[in-house]
Image (tube, rainbow, N blue to C red):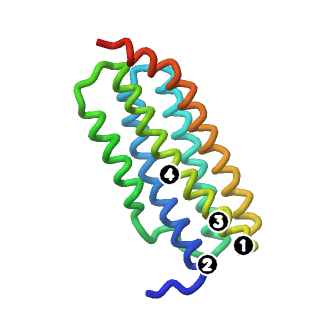
Amino acid sequence: MKMESLKELFVEELQDLYSAETQITKALPKMAKAATSPALKDAFESHLEETREQIKRLDQIFESLGENSKGKTCEGMKGLLKEGDELMKEDADPEVMDAGLIAAAQRVEHYEMAGYGTVRTYAELLGEDDAVSLLETTLKEEKAADSKLSKVANKINVQANKAA
């Protein structure tokens, strides 16, 4: 099917984000379990709750647009999460594993920030003011999660450097 409008692209991008967020809700508990740092475990667990709220916001947007949230699998997120899964199978010192988990999580956050920034701009252009507000809230949460991971990384990366 030919995509003929920004609104069609907007919906497709929202479906992609919905798929990404759904995948993340399955990955975060595994990442929290693999983490040894209490601060990192907490960051993953609190972001899981935020992610569930982000999915609810996306549901609100789909409902207001009269569109279905299901449509496609986010292959980009699938790949990022696969890399994280592969990391968790490695035999690594705990601090090194935690540093790797942070790196994997920050790749995910940056992917999400790019996606949410884009759809927020589309929503602005399309006059979807309620969607703009909901997407901006999520974008701020993603930036805050990335910042929290950076703060945790400052300590863990130093510890990982001293390992072995």
Q: Type of residue at label 4?
A: Tyr
The image shows residue 35 at horizontal and vertical percentages of 39, 26
State whether residue 73 is above or below residue 88. below
Q: Identify the residue position indicated by label 3 in the image.
A: 61
Neighbour tally class for label 3: few under 14, some 14-19, many 20 plus, Cα within 10 Å? many
Q: Identify the residue position indicated by label 2 in the image.
A: 6
The image shows residue 160 at horizontal and vertical percentages of 38, 18
Viewer-proximal residue, 49 or 117? 117
Neighbour tally class for label 2: few under 14, some 14-19, many 20 plus, Cα within 10 Å? few
95 with respect to 155 (left or right): left
Measured in 3D between alpha carbons, the distance from the residue under mark 2 to the one under mark 4, in whole angstroms, is 21 Å
Foreground tag (1 vs 3): 1
Q: Identify the residue position indicated by label 1 in the image.
A: 125
Foreground tag (4 vs 3): 4
Q: State the image quarter where residue 34 is shown.
A: top left
**Residue at coordinates 57% horizontally, 26% vertically from top-left?**
151
Measured in 3D between alpha carbons, the distance from the residue under mark 4 to the one under mark 1, in whole angstroms, is 22 Å
Question: Which quadrant of the rendered structure holds the N terminus?
Answer: bottom left
Q: Verify CB contact (< 8 Å) between mark 2 and mark 1.
A: yes
Q: Type of residue at label 3?
A: Ile
Q: Type of residue at label 2?
A: Leu
Q: Verify CB contact (< 8 Å) between mark 1 and mark 3.
A: no
